[in-house]
Amino acid sequence: MSDFSALFTEIFEANNLNRFITENNIAAFERLTGLLADFNARTNITAVAGERETIALHYADSLVCADLIPEGAHLLDVGCGGGFPSLPLAVARPDLHVTALDATAKKLRFVELAAADLGLDNIAPLCGRAEVLGHEPKHRGKYSVVVARAVAPLGRLLEYCLPFTSSDGRFIALKGQHGAEELEESASALEKLRGRVIRSCEYTLYGAGEPQSRFAAVFVPSGKLPDSFPRSNAAITKRPL
Ligand code: SAH
């Protein structure tokens, strides 16, 4: 067993992700780790450095939500940065059709490069601002699963993400240790955006130093979203719902 394989196995077991420990996944994630390190040395796209941190904070942390995603979903990752959680999901869940959205083109270049190198045909980059694309008929209400990790406070994130969610779809917010408080504070935003929370859980991420607290919440549309949402970025930032 290579060092990478041993580390991957240890961290995935610690996070109860045993079902993803396969030869194919280990080979793909080892390759992805090399690509990310090379790319990051030239263009800084992530602060996470080292194999242990990359496996725990990028791969395991991206895949903890995998069971909340139905088979064959059309998934949009809003504010994917260098492709998290979208790239690990595309690797480990070949059944998904993944779109990786970010406003920063240089970060999406990594998604493109990694997808080409790993031969992933189930992930496509989308460059633009969420609050703009959320009004386009091609994207509004068109995704059965929307996910976002580490993008904005939950009230704002709901305004970015619910417009993309199909009427029978769901939005999964991946948050850090203050997620439960953010959820309480987002009641008014949820009401205005016609959304409802159907599930939330606190959990622990293991493998990178001290265990870290995490929070995930699943939202569904509970009515038709008014056309006025999402508002402009200035309004979203300056006038929280
Ligand atoms: N989800 C990734 C990146 C988080 S950093 C991860 O967990 O590693 C936040 C990212 O969100 C940045 O890359 C930023 O460009 C993007 N972002 C923030 N607001 C956005 C918006 N309104 N539309 C599109 N992308 C946005």
Image (spheres, rainbow, N blue to C red):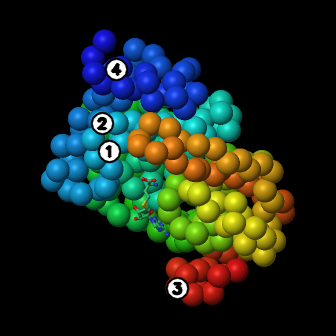
Q: Are marks 3 and 2 in contact (CB under 8 Å)?
A: no
Give percent across and percent down for residue 46: 32, 54
Q: Are marks 4 and 3 in contact (CB under 8 Å)?
A: no
Which label sits on residue 5?
Answer: 4
State the SS at label 2.
helix
Q: Nearer the viewer, mark 4 or mark 3?
A: 4
Q: Which amino acid type is marked by label 3?
A: Ala
Q: Is residue 8 left or right of residue 156?
A: left
Q: Quadrant of residue 38?
A: top left
Position of residue 175 relative to residue 55, above or below, is below
Give percent across and percent down for residue 183: 71, 64
The crowd level at tag 4 (other Cα within 10 Å; few <14, some 14-19, many 20+) is some
Position of residue 165 relative to residue 227, above or below, is above
The crowd level at tag 3 (other Cα within 10 Å; few <14, some 14-19, many 20+) is few
- Residue on which the image places disc 3: 234
Q: Which amino acid type is marked by label 1?
A: Glu
- Identify the residue at the far front of this view: 210
Give percent across and percent down for residue 102: 42, 60
- Residue on which the image places disc 1: 112
State the SS at label 4.
helix
Give percent across and percent down for residue 2: 27, 17
**Number of on-image labels:** 4
Q: Nearer the viewer, mark 3 or mark 1?
A: 3
Query: N-terminal of the two: label 2 or label 4?
Result: 4
* Camera sees residue 68: yes
- Identify the residue at the far left of this view: 42
